[in-house]
Image: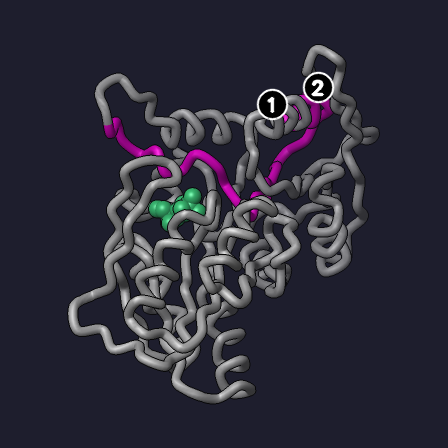
Amino acid sequence: MPFTAPDLVIGFPDSEPAAAGLARAMGLPLSLAALHRFPDGESLVRLEGAPRHPVIVRALDRPNDKLVELHFLADALRERGAGAITLVAPYLAYMRQDMEFRPGEVVSQRVMGRWLSGLVDRIVTVEPHLHRTDDLAHVFPGREAHALTAAPLIGAWAKAEAAREGGDWIVLGPDEESGPLVDSVARAAGLTGLVARKERRGDRDVTVTLPDGADIRGATVLLVDDVISSGGTMIDAARAATAAGAGRLLAAATHALYDERAADAMRAAGIARVISCDGVAHPSNAIPLADLLLGALGH
Ligand code: R5P
């Protein structure tokens, strides 16, 4: 069933460029929700008007305050009579905790599923870190859910760069979970894809091991992952690739969540350049997601 046509795009101060781009592309007006943070940490959200079918645009990285503000806004929109509400969250937090890894852990993916399903009718996101759940619709019961992949866009970027710079190029994923993304990027780029193994001992403590027999000597190795957060995964993948004789190291991620310290550490590990998609605003952004998101919104 076609989704009710949206009539307004709403952004937050941190998502203004993405929201404005989407509003322009959809030919819709844009409103910005204003935020005030009280000295005690509470949030005040302000948005005038009563749209019927709004599209809210906000990446949910560093999510805790953003989720509360989203809740306040979506609830207020319902009070004012909104019908179908769409959430475009290019990065969707809390998807990776999809089971109780250790006794007593809260399965945050399930909580998020029920929470957001109670707020909005349609959710659009990119590379949502689903590994044991094969369909985002299972996370958001009764809601329309779109999990998009940026792999073709990253692949097209890699293809153009490889053609421009020449030499041998290899796409390398740091762990088994990156396998599907790496396969699709490599296919779109017309390059060979390899997938390493990763042992994670702590938030910043990982060891990446290249697949047996991987010959990457002298090649430009493009490390590809869905998210760069602490940078630890990319840094250890770079160490392994350098030890195996890689000629040059680049990295690409759908979502860049890392800070300047991690950027320095990745540079020090020999990664010449990191590029990312622009769902989360970051200095490494090089690949726009607007057309991909637009396609999912039926425009
Ligand atoms: C893990 O499963 C993800 O796909 C990424 O490899 C991970 O989130 C990267 O995190 P960090 O940059 O902190 O190593």
- Mark 2 closeness class: few <14, some 14–19, many ≥20 residues within 10 Å: some
Residue drawn where x is 69% and y is 40% of the image: 54
Q: Secondary structure at mark 2?
A: strand
Q: Are marks 1 and 2 in contact (CB under 8 Å)?
A: yes
User: Which residue corresponds to mark 2?
Assistant: 43
Q: CA gap, disc 1 to disc 2? A: 8 Å
Q: Main secondary structure of the magenta part?
A: loop
Indicate the quadrant containing the C terminus: top left, top right, bottom left or bottom right. Answer: bottom right
Q: Amino acid at mark 1?
A: Val
Q: Which mark is residue 211?
A: none
Q: Which residue occupies 40% across, 72% down?
A: 221
Task: Report the front residue among 35 and 274.
Answer: 274
Which comes sooner in the sequence, label 1 or label 2? 2
> At 40% across and 77% down in the image, what residue appears?
247
Considering depth in this image, is 228 or 159 the residue closer to the camera? 228
User: 197 and 289: which one is in front?
Assistant: 197
- Vertical position of residue 265 compared to residue 58: above or below: below
Q: Is residue 66 left or right of residue 112?
A: right
Q: Amino acid at mark 2?
A: Ser
Asked if 214 appears above or below 296 in the picture, the reply is below
Point 53% across, 45% down: residue: 91
Q: Is residue 266 rendered to the left or right of residue 108?
A: right
Residue positioned most to the right: 48
Residue 272 in sight from this viewpoint: yes
Q: Which residues are magenta?
A: 74-101
Please, is residue 266 above or below residue 80 in the view? below
Q: Which label was assigned to residue 68?
A: 1
